[in-house]
Amino acid sequence: MPKSTRILADDHPVIGIKDSCVYVWNSPWSKCSDFEKSVAYPLNGICCINKSDENRMEVVDKDKFISSVLAQYPSYVDREKLKVVLETIVNDVPVYDLYCRNDISSAIFSVNKLVGGDQSL
């Protein structure tokens, strides 16, 4: 992994919009970040991880992604407001389905695709 790579919030990041840019923050629910130090970085992509027998990555349909995220929220959440935020995010940030094996090859594949220059999808 590149030396500049840091685990920010494992599977509990906070994603939001600040100054017309999409950011990801660490959160108090993360097991491996220090929430005492609030840290944010511009978000360059979202990967939805799926188990598979082969490593591959596909661009996700934006409407499918939004519907999938909305379905995970409880009924008391204002879905119209959330949908507006999600639409803003997916218009600025690419979303991928990452299908990967349960071994080191998937980590190498992911890094090469996302930060290593192999942009073929």
Image (spheres, rainbow, N blue to C red):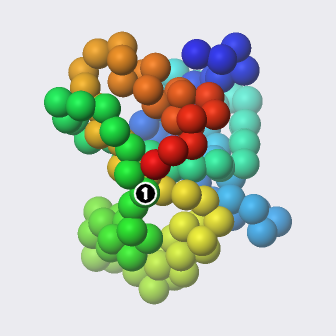
Q: Specify the farthest residue to the bottom.
A: 80
Q: Quadrant of residue 62?
A: bottom left
Q: Is residue 117 above or below residue 46?
A: above
Lateral position of residue 17 relative to residue 105, left or right: right
Q: Nearer the viewer, residue 112 or 43?
A: 112
Q: Quadrant of residue 100?
A: top left
Q: Specify the farthest residue to the left.
A: 53
Residue at position x 38%, y 44% in the image: 57
Q: Quadrant of the N terminus?
A: top right
* Label 1 residue SS: strand
Q: Nearer the viewer, residue 13 or 97?
A: 97
Q: Is residue 59 above or below residue 1?
A: below
Q: Quadrant of residue 79?
A: bottom left
Q: Specify the farthest residue to the right.
A: 19
Tag 1: residue type? Answer: Val
Q: Is residue 28 visible?
A: no
Lateral position of residue 99 relative to residue 18, left or right: left
Residue at position x 53%, y 27% in the image: 111
Instruction: Using a 10 Å C-alpha cutoff, classify the residue at mark 1 as few (fewer than 14 neighbours), some (14 to 19) or many (20 or more).
Output: few
Q: Is residue 121 above or below residue 94?
A: above
Residue at position x 61%, y 38% in the image: 26
Q: Is residue 19 visible?
A: yes
Task: Look at mark 1 in the image and give the residue it sits on.
Answer: 59
Q: Nearer the viewer, residue 76 or 108?
A: 108
Residue 5 x/y as whole percent: 65, 23
Residue 19 x/y as whole percent: 82, 65
Residue 87 x/y as whole percent: 53, 76
Lateral position of residue 105 relative to residue 119, left or right: left
